[in-house]
Amino acid sequence: MHDGGDRVDLPQQLIRSIHQALELDPDSIDNPLDELSDEFNPLDVLNQLFPDEASLTQLETVQGRLAEDERLLQQEIHSLEDELERDQDPNRIQLIQEMISDVLGQMSRIREKASESEAVVRNITKDIQNLDLAKKNLTTTMTTLKRLQMLGNALTQLEDQVREKRYSEVAQTLLAVKEISAAFKSYTAVPYIARLWKRVQQVTGEVRAQVDAEFEAFYLQDPSKQPRTSQITDACSVVDVLGLDVRTQLIERYVAIELKEYRRIFRANDEAGHLDNISRRFAWFRRLLTSHEAETGKVFPVEWRVSWWLFTKFVAITRDDLSTLLSKAGSSLTLTLLLGTLQQTTEFESAMSKKWAASLDEILSAASSPAAPVQPMSSAFEPHLWIYVEAQDKALADMLALHRNPKTRGSLDAATRPSTAGSTPRVSLSADDHGESKPIVMPSSTELFYFYAQNLEQCAKLSTDQALFDLYGIQKKWLKIYAGPFLPLSDSSYFPRPHTLTRKSLDTHFDAAEFRRTCLVVNTADYCQRTALELEDKIKEKIAERFKEKVTLQMERDLFMSVLSGAINCQLRELEMACEGVFTALSRVNWSMTNQVTGYSAYVDDLVKVIEQVADQIK
C-alpha cells in the first residue's frame, strides 16, 4: 500500500469552484477525502485507511462507508443542480434586468432635477451675492476713507507737534503715521494717495532733520549752560521710531565728537602716543567714560548702550595706533616693552568686560558693523609675539647650558622630588642606611617642566593663537634635545666597558656610583615621558581650536622611553658583570666528580651578596 504512484493534479480554478460550491474550508477539513488540491495523492489516503495488513480485514466496512459518502455527495450535487436551474430561470433574469433599467432611469431623472434645482438656487442667490460683494466693497471703502482721514489728521497733528518741539508726542504720532501709511503703499498709483504719501515722506524728513539739529546742538553745547536733557530724552524716543539707521548715525556722531580730543592728544608721532605711554591712553578713556556716565550719557536710553559704542570706537582707534607703533619699532622693540604694553592692554580690556558683565567679543560686536567687526586691541600684538617666543627659546638654551656644562655635571648626582608640569620644583635628597644621598630624578628635568608650565600660562594670557603654537614648537624642540645630551644613556656607549677583566673569580665588586647614575636616568626618563603627556593635554586645553589637532608630543615621549630602555639595559649588563666572577668560579668546578649533595655551596652566598648589593642601589 506504500508503493509510489502517479499524482492526480486538478486545475486550481476547478478546485476553488468545487470548494465554493460545497462551501468547504480547506483549513478545517478533517477527512483527507474532502480535501481537494493540486497536491492530492490517493496513495496517502489509502495508506491512512489501511495502515497495515491487519486493517485489510475491514475492507468491506471501508467500502460501505465510502459508498455512503458517494451517495450523500451525489444527493448534494443533485440538490445544487436543482437550485442552479431555478436561479437561472430566463423569466426571472429578464425581470431583474427590467428592474435595473428602472433604477438607472430614476437616477437619471434625479440628476436632471438636481441640475434644475441648482440653477434655480443660483438665480435666487445671485442678487444676494451681489449684495454681499457690494457690502464688502463698501466696508473696505469706508475703512480706507476713515484711514485716509486719520492719516490726514495725524499728519496735521504731527506738523504742529514738530513745530512746537513736543517730541514725546511726536514719537507717538509719528509711529501712528508710519503704521497707517503702510496700508496705502500698494495704492500709490491713485493720485490723491500718491500726494498724501509724498506728504508723509516730507513730514518724516522734516522730523529727522529737526531731530538731527537738536542732537547736534546738544553735542556741541556750551558746558557752562544748563543742558536740555529732558527734551533730548524725548527726542531719543523719536529716533527709535525713525529707525535703527538714524540711531546709529546719531551715536556715531556723538562718539566721534567725544573722541576727537583723544585723536589730537595721542597721535602716534607724538610722545603721548608712544607705546610706553599706553597707560595714559587708558586713564584718559576712564575719565571720559566717567564723565559720560555721570552727565551726557544719562539722556540716552539704556538699550542704546552708548558706553559700548564709545569703548568700541576707542578700541578701533587705539588698535590702529598700536599696530602702527609696533611696526615702526621693528627690531628696537624690546621684550620688556612688548610684554608690559600687552599686559596693560589685556588688563584694561578685562576691566571693561567685567564692568559691563559681558564678554569683550559681545561688546565689540554689539557696537560695530557685522561686515567690519572691530578686533580687540590686544590682537595688534599678535604679529609681534615672535619676540616673546624667541626670548623663551634663548632662556631655555641658557638654563639648560648650566646643566650641560661638565663643571656643573654634579646635578646628575643631586636629586629632586618629581613634580608635575605646573608645580614648583623642590630639591629633596633621600638617604640610604649610611646617610648617603640617593638620587631620584635630575634637577634639570623638573626645572625644565616648571619653566614650561610658567611659559605656557604666561603665553596663554597673551595669546592662544599662533604665538602659543610657536611656543609649543619651541618646547617640543627642547624636549627632543633634552632626551639626547642631557640623558646620555640613550645609547649603549655611555658606560665604557673595560678591555680586560682583572677581577678574581670571587670578586663580586661592581661600580655602585655608576649604577646609581643609571637609576637616576631611568627615573628621569620615566618622569619626563609622563609629564610630557600632561604638558600636551594642557597645551591642547589652552590653544585655539584650529591648532588642537596639530599638538602632539608622542615622538618626544618615545625618545624618553628609548632612553629609559637603554638605561635598564646598562643596569642589566652591570648586574651580569657583577655576577660574572661567581659564575666563572662555578663553571670551574668539576661537577662530574660530585655524586651526591655535599651541603650548602659557598658560591650561593657570593651570588646572593652581589644581587643584594645591586638591589640596594635600585631601592
Image (tube, rainbow, N blue to C red):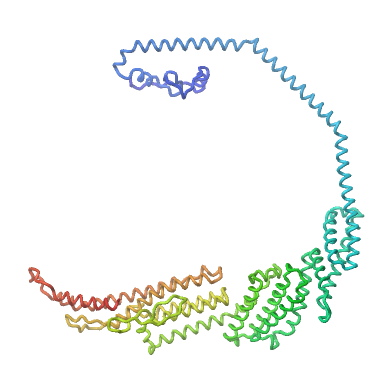
**Residue with the most extreme bottom position:** 407
Q: In the image, is 479 to the left or to the right of 610?
A: right
Q: Nearer the viewer, residue 456 or 504?
A: 456
Give the number of marks. 0
The answer to whether residue 238 shows anywhere in this view is yes
- Above-or-below relation of 146 to 74: below
- Above-or-below relation of 257 to 3: below
The answer to whether residue 494 shows anywhere in this view is no
Residue at the image position 67 percent from the left and 78 percent from the top: 319
Q: Position of residue 88 (x, y in %)?
A: 60, 12
Q: Quadrant of the C terminus?
A: bottom left
Q: Nearer the viewer, residue 456 or 423?
A: 423
- Above-or-below relation of 529 to 402: above
Q: In the image, is 344 to the left or to the right of 410?
A: right
Q: In the image, is 371 to the left or to the right of 563?
A: right
Q: Quadrant for residue 284, please give it.
A: bottom right
Q: Quadrant of the N terminus?
A: top left
Q: Nearer the viewer, residue 168 or 221?
A: 168
Q: Nearer the viewer, residue 520 or 63?
A: 520
Q: Position of residue 60 (x, y in %)?
A: 35, 10
Q: Position of residue 373 (x, y in %)?
A: 68, 70
Q: Quadrant for residue 497, please give it.
A: bottom left
